[in-house]
Image (cartoon, grey):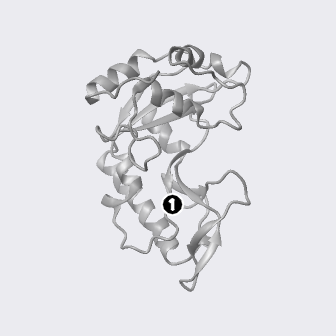
Amino acid sequence: MKASPPQTEAELWMRATAIAQQSLGDLAAAVSMTVPNDFRREKGFIGQLLERVLGATAGNLSKPDFTHLGIELKTLPLNANGQPKESTYVSIVPLMGREPLSWQHCELYQKLRRVLWIPYFFDKTVEPRYWRLSDPVLWSPTAEEEAILREDWYELMSRVQMGRLDQINARLGQYLQIRPKAMNADVRTQGIGSNGECVRTSPRGFYLRTSFTARIIF
């Protein structure tokens, strides 16, 4: 059973704070789901669980998860010290995008304008059903943070549109980085080559660095 969509940001926040410190097993049982023992084949399970518990509306659309509120939902695994364990995927990189660069109209900006972060403690010593949520954070970037994100995005997308895919690596970008986004190395999509031609290349995604997400939750 999925929760009905929250009607206001305040209602969503109330739901998010109500489940803080709960285990994945308890949350899953409340909505008739079962926590897998191995997330390697079900990496999206925690996000799907929280979408059901909190009443997300976007489904598979490339829009913020709570579309009617303009709020994106992001889970964040924490290590034993309470630090982000890995970078956070935000959106796919439009490798064939030939339209003029516009930060205000890109999918990345739409998803980062307002984010509900739900951190959880990743613990290999126990079964995932015993993992617990940490306290939620409802966040919007400051003017300074947005300026840096925008600068990173322009630099990275400029290289994409100029066909310089081979020059893009995870070291580029202060807060934002581009990394491969595929189930395996054999997956291919279309991109722009150095001479403007269509080439076959690996799908890529925009990710937030752990150094940046750590700033958000502390």
* Residue occupying the point 52% across, 17% down: 27
Residue situated in front as seen by the camera: 178 or 94: 94
Residue under the point 28% across and 30% down: 9
Neighbor class of circle 1 (other Cα within 10 Å; few <14, some 14-19, many 20+) is many
- Residue 207: x %, y % from top left: 53, 50
Q: Amino acid at mark 1?
A: Val
Element under disc 1: loop
Q: Tell me: 108 left or right of 163.
A: left
Return the residue at label 1.
Answer: 93
Q: Nearer the viewer, residue 99 or 84?
A: 99
Vertical arrangement, residue 133 with respect to residue 143, above or below: above
Quarter of the figure with the C terminus: top left
Residue 200, quarter of the rendered image: bottom right
Pinpoint residue 96: horizontal percent, then vertical percent: 50, 71
Instruction: Name above or below for residue 197 compared with residue 32.
Output: below
Q: Measured from the top left, where is residue 21 in percent x and y?
A: 50, 15
Give the residue at x 55% y 55%: 205
Question: Is residue 172 found left or right of 157 in the rendered image?
Answer: right
Q: Is residue 173 left or right of residue 131?
A: left
Residue at 60% x, 40% y: name it. 86
Locate residue 205 relative to residue 20 in the image: left or right.
right
Q: Quadrant of residue 73?
A: top left
Quarter of the rendering containing residue 201: bottom right
**Residue that extends furthest to the front in the rendered view of this protein:** 1
Q: Is residue 27 above or below residue 109?
A: above
Q: How many marks?
A: 1
Q: Nearer the viewer, residue 2 or 150?
A: 2
